[in-house]
Amino acid sequence: MNLTRRSKTPRRVGTSIFLSAIVSSLLLAAVPAQAGLILPDSPDRPGYWGRRPAEGSVSQTDPPSFTWPDTQYVWELQCARDAGFDDVVYSAAGIELNVHCPPKAFGPGRYFWRYRGTRAGDRPSIWTKPYAFNIADDAVQMPMPKRRELLSRIPDSHPRLFLRPENLPKLRRLAQGKMQRQYENLVKQCDKILAEPPPTAEPPKYPPDMARKSEGWRKMWWGNRTYTIKALNSAATLAFTRLLGDQDKYGREAKRILLECAKWDPKGSTGYRYNDEAGMPYNYYFARTYTFVNDLLTEQEKEICRKVMKVRGDEMYDHLCPRHLQRPYSSHSNRAWHFLGEVGIAFLDEVEGADDWVWFATNVFFNTYPVWSDDDGGWHEGVSYWSSYIGRFTWWADVMREAMGIDAYDKPYFSKIGYYAMYLMPPGKVGGGFGDLTARRTAKSNRQLMTVLAAQAQNPHWQWYVDQLGGPDSAGGYIGFLRGQLPKVEAKPPTDLPSSRLFGGTGQAYLNSGLTDASESVQVVLKASPFGTQSHGYEANNSFLLWAYGKRLLIRSGYRDIYGSAHHQNWMWSTRSTNCITINGQDQLKHTVRAQGRIVAFETTPDVDVVIGDASDSYGPEVELFKRAILFVKPDLVIVYDRLKAREPSTFEYWLHAVNEFDLDNPRHVKVTNGEAACTITFLKPRGLTFEQTNEYDPNPRSRVSLREWHVTARTEEKRKQMEFLVLYRPHRAGESFASGGVFHKTPGGYFLKTGAADRKLTALLPTDDNATMEAAGLRTTGAIKLKLESPGQPAQILEIREDRM
């Protein structure tokens, strides 16, 4: 079977487009026939990708990717050097998605862009207003091939995923030569599969009376995923290994498993919409097996596979396109799109619509990826989801490079991605910061992914990090074999890097006293995220975490028994579960992009770090202001200064959480210990707090989870509209003495603080108002935190922290 590969347009774009077309037709009916429709110039809506490049932005890629709100027209786009569009440098028409990445670079400089849309039989809309943007001088050139050219790069014959037919002879030589050991490991793996073949009976659907997210449901939901992976990844492994040598028995078994799994109902228990955790791996492992074993299949057997993947591929495409190009902030969809791309490549010219699947996936990569970060790196959903999702994305990067000649690692994000793991989880670290499933993660968990990233980016700092975690770790299996050809990287310790770093796009600052060994250092993490509390990055803005000497001291609490359970939603998504502040017992907005935060100031030096987070827009209209400043005098003094304003007189609750019980014998000097690490916590402001402590959650997780952690609430007694908290944290090794004491008092315009840290003296002016002027101890400031750090034998350091100084 051979279909025309070069089809020009998508076959369909989903039900949402049909509804949009109705709305658009009604709008057009209200416009005089001689006038073009005026497209709305409304601000970007929460949860939507929006109009990009944004007004005044700087693109680090050349050309930039263009996106706009989609009302389902056929689009025309122009880009010019002037706002009047007399000097047009690029134009494109007939664009059917709401995204476009040009096939040529523009060059650095200032540009303007605009767009308009047309529906069949109607006049074009009025051009939008021009939007200005700049392309950086050092922007990476990443033009996107045109559709016809892109599809023409994919091999006509098989295999097509991870390797090309013409590369097989080289891989076979490697298998008998310098990669013989890796090949022999594959052979052992295959022999084990032959000795104990995976079951291939179709897994069951949920019983009609089974409650969604019950314990029985959870086991079946995840169990069907692991069952599917065992069957079809075993087939892919057998099929790939057969390509490297004369192992026909592997090919025969791979073919048998493939055809047995092809009998499963494509919309049954492993259907993408029924259970995507089973449906996604079914689809990509099936596609890999198909392309690896293709030459052993009869035409009739190929047609069986094509019919299965037609149904499954359409189901994914209908769900993802164009929705994911407009609203890409769905967690699972951020891996589904490139799995669909794999299926499209494997079945290109063989299944109707496969070309659309490839074109869609490539457009996602160029125009709306990555979703959970900006170019600076980081990952809003947390390091566990970063590792999982980027790890799977590297498969697509391998596929794109081989099949289409596109290097994913040219994207600016991938030039900085590894610093996220390095700064959040220095070697020896336990606990992965904010995000789902991170609490007990270790730095070594990053080893395999960082091995790939270090090699692809040729980054010596990341290679040093890999070496500290035990050295390079291949993915194993056929992916590991293929990556065995990655170039070596010379390691370099991060002694030339600052020990702290801001990831502004995700609104997280990682303040470290050192990067080389977590067991010898102290770390503070602050979150104030423009992504809000949505998805798996649900922790409250302006919450913080504290580690010392390899131990978790102040934590984000709870245990995910299952996503969306009562405990997960009502405790872990609640501000109460974090080291943060509630107002009148009110949480920040839960699990939503509307809970906006951002880092408004960041300064790092070898001796002191300062970061300020703004969570004023995280609570709702009842709260007018919440700014949290953290001053970290490395390594043994952390000052947390909070300013809050409510519309009505309110109580304020200050929450802290730890692995072990807090010592509240002296409420003004709270103590917490975890193994060899300890921290003394001094509440300077306000006075008269009421302290409570419990090791129960509200609500507790399911009975199978025995974990309990400790929670302290410090509550104000007097109701006030405005409140400041000033709290000193002194991390130290348990049993060792530490600096304490100091001078603190209210002065006109704010607070004066003078305290010690080891043999150093810190003086700080802490304004209570952005316009307040303070003057004390030879320091003067208006609206900005100002501090002086005096160290023996060194000139005094004076820092004034202005907001939006990033």
Image (cartoon, rainbow, N blue to C red):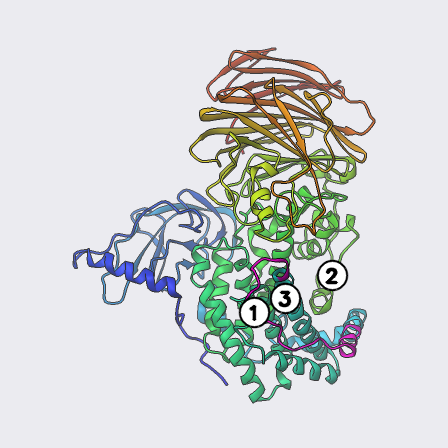
Disc 3 and disc 1: Cα gap in Å? 19 Å
> Label 1 near label 3: C-beta < 8 Å?
no
The residue indicated by pointer 2 is: 474
Amino acid type for the residue under numbered disc 2: Ser
Q: Quadrant of residue 226?
A: bottom right
Mark 3 or 1, closer to the camera: 3
Give the percent coordinates (x, y) of residue 295: 63, 84
- Image depth: mark 3 or mark 2 in front: 3
Name the residue that disc number 1 marks.
342
Q: Give the crowd class for mark 1: few <14, some 14-19, many >=20 residues within 10 Å.
A: many
For marks 1 and 2, the one nearer the N-term is 1
Q: Where are the magenta residues, as a range?
A: 188-216
The residue to which callout 3 is attached is: 225
Residue 508 percent coordinates (x, y) = 59, 39
What residue is drawn where x is 64% and y is 56%? 388
Amino acid under disc 3: Arg
Tell me if 397 is positioned left or right of 719 in this view.
right
Q: Residues within 10 Å of mark 2 (few under 14, many from 20)?
A: some
Q: Is residue 74 visible?
A: no
Seen from the viewer's position, the closer of residues 230 and 98 is: 230
In this orientation, which residue lies closer to the viewer: 682 or 103? 682
